[in-house]
Image: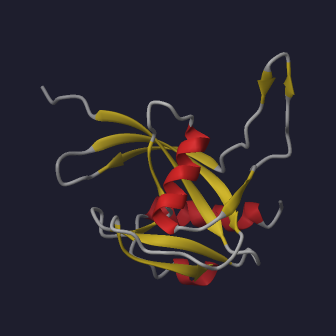
Amino acid sequence: MASPLKKCIVGGVLLFNKERNKVLLLKHRKLGVWIYPGGHLQPEEDPLECAIRETREETGTTFHVVSSTNIEISGDGTVSLPQPLIIMREIVPYAEGAHEHFDMIYLGVADEDYYITNQESMDSGWFTKEEIAELETFGNVKDIIRYGFEVINQR
């Protein structure tokens, strides 16, 4: 019998430039494909905090998160958080063994076009909607990015 997959909660940000016509992507060192910044949840974090931390670590960029909805609810000691663009259940094919990720992908807008490429990535860059079709990545990542372009321009 096959052993169960390691389950992980991860957070990421589909990060757009100020003009909202380009998205910042990283060429992932382990996977060898272009993806949005993100990573694994730490014990003291919620998914939004994870997404913000990972994106700052991997890009060096300052940005603000944009909710995918206009709904905000608070009161009685509660507050709604910005809604992710999408939550994906993904089987990630790492060399040491596949993991099952529950990926909370938020929308973000960069304060400036500055970014860094850190040790987790082979490369980084801003890409237009048209350039996404030619990128070496997973089909669902292209779908998420295309959807992100639609939603970010409505916020």
Left or right: where does residue 97 sit relative to residue 25?
A: left
Left or right: where does residue 125 sit relative to residue 27?
A: right
Q: Residue at x 30, y 42 (%)?
A: 99
Q: Position of residue 111 (x, y in %)?
A: 72, 70
Pick the front one: 25 or 93: 25
Query: In terms of image quadrants, where is residue 107?
Result: bottom right
Query: In terms of image quadrants, where is residue 145?
Result: bottom right
Left or right: where does residue 68 sit relative to residue 128?
A: right
| Quadrant for the C terminus in the image | bottom right
Q: Residue furthest top?
A: 76
Report the label total: 0
Pick the front one: 56 or 150: 56
Q: Position of residue 106 (x, y in %)?
A: 63, 52
Residue 98 vertical placement versus 142 (above, below): above
Query: In terms of image quadrants, where is residue 21?
Result: bottom right
Q: Residue at x 80, y 18 (%)?
A: 77
| Quadrant for the N terminus in the image | top left
Q: Position of residue 3 (x, y in %)?
A: 17, 29
Q: Position of residue 13 (x, y in %)?
A: 58, 57
Residue 92 vertical placement versus 110 (above, below): above
Left or right: where does residue 9 sit relative to residue 109?
A: left
Q: Residue at x 74, y 60 (%)?
A: 151
Q: Residue at x 60, y 61 (%)?
A: 14
Q: How is the image coloured?
A: secondary structure
